[in-house]
Image (cartoon, grey):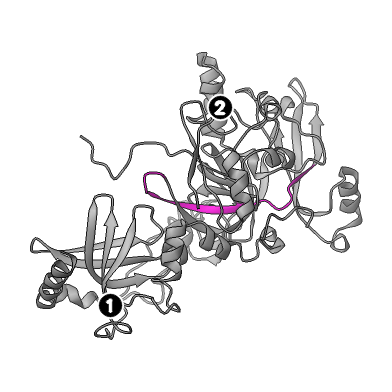
Amino acid sequence: MTQDVPDGLPTSLLEGKALMAHLAKTLPTPAAQTLLSTYFNPRHPDHVLPGSVLSVSLPTGPFAGILISIRRKGIDTSFTLRNVVQRTGVEMRFNVCSPLIKDVKIISRAGQNGGKRMRRAKLFYLRDQPGKMTAISTAVKKASS
Amino acid sequence: MILTRVQTPLRSYVASTSASVLVRHVTSSPGLQAQAVKGGYSTETTATISKWTPTSIRTGLIAKKRGMAAVWNDHGARVPVTVLQIENCQVTKTVETPRHRKEPYYGIQVAATDKRPKLVTATMRGHFRKAGVPPKQIVIEFPVTQDALVPVGTTLSALHFVPGQFVDVAAKSVGKGFSGVMKRWNFGGLRASHGVSISHRSAGSTGGHQDPGRVWPGQKMAGRLGGERVTMQNLLVVRIDTVLNLIFVKGAVPGPDGGHVFISDAKRKMISEAIRKTKKGLAVEECLPAGLDVLPFPAGTKEMAEKLPKIVVAPTRGRNPFVALD
């Protein structure tokens, strides 16, 4: 290539080789990159499994709930937390790379490094199980208070 | 990574005096961070880019569509973007053709993506040698005004387009082959059951009976779909990266990943708007979209890119969608 290559980046990026993978790694903020490479990287020892209870700190206040789904799409990776708030089931879906997410705290883990292992990747069946959800929401409230 | 807001006090490449430019640093290259922190603009750079007039039409660029990604703006809203990469886009000819009872036609011929000389015909090899550029895969002409002519051999950069401006992106759409009438013309087809035999997706009737006794020309039928030039208008330029020569445009762009696209200033939101505002009597700065002062003129070149910040992001416009209206 006739063009110069900046510090440390391979020339093949200028030809577009592995460019999108490079952008998926470098476009998010460092905080988001850390989340993607640890909690939401299935190969990392500290990765979260569905069934864990997480708390996300947002500008409007924290939201805690049980992790019912992780959608892995590189920069568009998102996860859904479910909780019962004022007798109403609430689900919130968060984009991992969104700048609105200040922090993700793990209140309790499921599976390895933690308690019971869920036998599903997506826990959408919890939408039809109010009994289980009541138990989960009381535990979440107790743990986060 | 440090998120630095660069306040530019003078007329600048990207922002007006009231708006601010958000410059993001690429973590993988510490040298880049040092460069982006300074964010200065030399006076000679601003001098060369101050000749744009609202009635000028600049050249376009050829880029390659690499894929889609997402960026988040200051409000925290997600913006879907298409990543377009410029592969050694260079000017190969300036065209001037006289026209009967009109101003002459001016055009800039631009070529992109280097190719092995062995694979290029002798005719084209000679043409590229005359321009002083390596042989290229694709050669396209953009019509321009006389003041926007660029010398032959100039290498164009992603900096040619300013974050915050609007562009038209044209490309050959994804080919769908011989497609049926439901896909091609949105026909309703026939019922799935109740006696319909083997024609669930067919067109049905194609005309009358004895009168007219033929099928009208232009009757919608099955045939080849796609593989034709399509232009997406008024796409916002969200981000520029001169390190990897990338332009991030908001939304989708026709064609497959790896296909060539032709980017030019938006005909409706940039060129027509500028002419309309000039006729109203507005100043040069007001003829551009909000947050822009000038456009690199006659073109944003590789030399210009070396003097300006490496990564530039469009200023966030509009109200915060996450804050209630009260």
- Find disc 1 in the rendering and name its residue: A109
B242 in relation to B257, above or below: above
Task: Give me the disc on residue A49.
Answer: none
Q: Is residue B73 left or right of residue A50?
A: right
Kind of element beneath mark 1: loop
Q: Which quadrant would residue A76 be assigned to in this image?
A: bottom left
Identify which amino acid the numbered label 1 is placed on: Arg
**Of B250 and B180, which appears nearest the observer?**
B250
**Of B215 and B65, which appears nearest the observer?**
B65
A31 in relation to A129, above or below: above
- Find disc 2 in the rendering and name its residue: B293
**Of B98 and B121, which appears nearest the observer?**
B121
Q: Position of residue B326 (x, y in %)?
A: 20, 34
Kind of element beneath mark 2: loop
A105 in relation to B304, above or below: below
**Of B204 and B309, which appears nearest the observer?**
B309
Label 1 is found on which chain of the structure?
Answer: A
Residue located at (33% from left, 59% from top): A103
Q: CA distance from mark 1 to mark 2?
A: 53 Å
Q: Position of residue B219 (x, y in %)?
A: 50, 54
Does any portion of residue B175 appear in the rendered image?
no
Q: Position of residue A96 (x, y in %)?
A: 38, 62
Residue located at (65% from left, 53% from top): B244
Instruction: Specify whether residue B197 is painted magenta.
Output: no
Residue located at (28% from left, 54% from top): A58
Identify which amino acid the numbered label 2 is placed on: Asp
Q: Which quadrant would residue B187 be assigned to in this image?
A: bottom left
Label 2 is found on which chain of the structure?
Answer: B
Range shown magenta:
B74-91
Does any portion of residue A58 appear in the rendered image?
yes
